[in-house]
Image (cartoon, grey):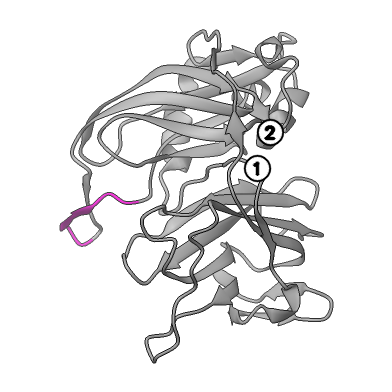
């Protein structure tokens, strides 16, 4: 069954937005005032209860700053990431997306996380070249749903110890490889992409291949069940690159055993657009320094 999994996820994995995960923080923090959220569309937000009701597809909620009419963008240059924690998410959506737009580039920083038992934690790394000119950041849902916003925090990144190579067999990493690591440990999935970062659009024109799904990470049990509510890998550039995840954002995948009793993570990459060569290089983990 596992050998057929790549074909399955090729059908479900290519998307405009690709999921990811990023480090937790251990330094400078700025807690956003949830009463001051000022950006919603296709939805209604209650500033007192912090309850968000998404009324349509691809609805959004968040904060907006620069507007092109003299109001300046936000300067988040002191921070490295945004972390959003939500609760009481209805069953109408399986995944939420956290997006950041800048006034200095058309590229959107976008990452997502699955909703598990009505809860989700979204992490997005701020673009280091443009984070001093943030236009807006917002949480999107593909489908109508309800949720309660618990916290929104800007923070600096965690520092880490020396990395350790994870043993891997055809994309499978046994759960024992993660024994003793904290939730703040950083897992790096390393791969190579060769070709061009373009794809043919629905209209037949050749366009840049931004935010293009290129792979997925999930529980080894999900592979057997042909169900993978895991983390998509985004193609960022041509050449060697990494997809990094805080271990705490992956730990839930280790709770499930496959038909043979194995527990672990399984990950694959595939060819998309005009990329001609994509293959796995390996995976590492490094413990956080608290």
| Dot 1 crowding, Cα within 10 Å, few <14, some 14–19, many 20+ | many
Q: Secondary structure at mark 2?
A: loop
Please say whether residue 43 is visible from this viewpoint. yes
Q: In this orientation, which residue lies closer to the viewer: 266 or 155?
A: 155
**Quarter of the figure that contains the N terminus:** top right
- x%, y% of residue 228? 60, 34
- Residue 184's label in the rendered image is 2
- x%, y% of residue 135? 45, 73
In the image, is 49 to the left or to the right of 184?
A: right
Q: Is residue 147 magenta?
A: no
Label 1 vs 2, first from the N-terminus: 1
Q: In this orientation, which residue lies closer to the viewer: 38 or 271?
A: 38
| Dot 2 crowding, Cα within 10 Å, few <14, some 14–19, many 20+ | many
> Which residue has dot 1 on it?
24
- Tell me what residue is drawn at x 15 percent, y 58 percent: 205
In the image, is 98 to the left or to the right of 256?
A: left
- The secondary structure making up most of the magenta span is loop
* Residue 182 occupies quadrant: top right
In the image, is 32 to the left or to the right of 215?
A: right
- Tell me what residue is drawn at x 37 percent, y 24 percent: 191
Q: Which residues are magenta?
A: 203-210
Q: In this orientation, which residue lies closer to the viewer: 50 or 255?
A: 50
User: Please, is residue 250 above or below residue 54 in the view?
Assistant: above
Please say whether residue 226 is visible from this viewpoint. no
Among all residues in the image, which is located at the extreme left?
A: 205
- x%, y% of residue 44? 69, 81
* Residue 241 occupies quadrant: top left
Q: Mark 1 near mark 2, Cβ–Cβ under 8 Å? A: yes
**Quarter of the figure that contains the C terminus:** top right
Distance from label 1 to label 2 (Cα)? 6 Å
- Tell me what residue is drawn at x 51 percent, y 61 percent: 99
User: Please, is residue 254 above or below residue 54 in the view?
Assistant: above
């Amino acid at each position: 069954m596992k050998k057929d999994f790549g074909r399955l996820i090729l059908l479900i994995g290519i998307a405009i937005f690709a999921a990811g995960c990023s480090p937790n923080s251990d330094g400078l923090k700025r807690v956003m005032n949830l009463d001051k959220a000022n950006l919603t569309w296709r939805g209604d937000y209650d500033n007192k209860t912090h309850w968000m009701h998404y009324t349509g597809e691809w609805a959004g909620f968040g904060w907006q700053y620069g507007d092109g009419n003299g109001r300046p963008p936000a300067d988040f240059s002191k921070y490295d990431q945004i972390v959003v924690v939500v609760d009481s998410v209805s069953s109408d959506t399986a995944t939420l997306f956290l997006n950041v737009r800048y006034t200095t580039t058309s590229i959107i920083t976008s990452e997502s996380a699955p909703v598990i038992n009505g809860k989700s934690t979204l992490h997005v790394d701020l673009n280091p070249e443009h984070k001093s000119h943030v236009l807006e950041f917002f949480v999107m849902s593909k489908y109508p749903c309800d949720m309660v916003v618990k916290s929104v925090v800007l923070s600096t990144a965690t520092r880490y110890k020396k990395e350790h190579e994870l043993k891997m067999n055809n994309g499978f990493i046994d759960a024992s490889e993660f024994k003793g690591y904290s939730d703040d440990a950083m897992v790096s999935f390393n791969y190579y992409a060769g070709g061009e970062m373009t794809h043919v659009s629905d209209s037949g024109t050749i366009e840049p291949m931004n935010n293009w799904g290129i792979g997925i990470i999930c529980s080894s049990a999900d592979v057997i069940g042909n169900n993978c509510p895991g983390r998509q890998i985004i193609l960022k550039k041509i050449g060697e690159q990494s997809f990094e995840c805080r271990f705490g954002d992956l730990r839930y995948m280790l709770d499930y055993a496959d038909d043979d009793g194995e527990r672990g993570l399984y990950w694959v990459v595939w060819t998309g657009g005009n990329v001609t060569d994509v293959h796995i290089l390996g995976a590492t983990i490094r413990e956080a320094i608290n």
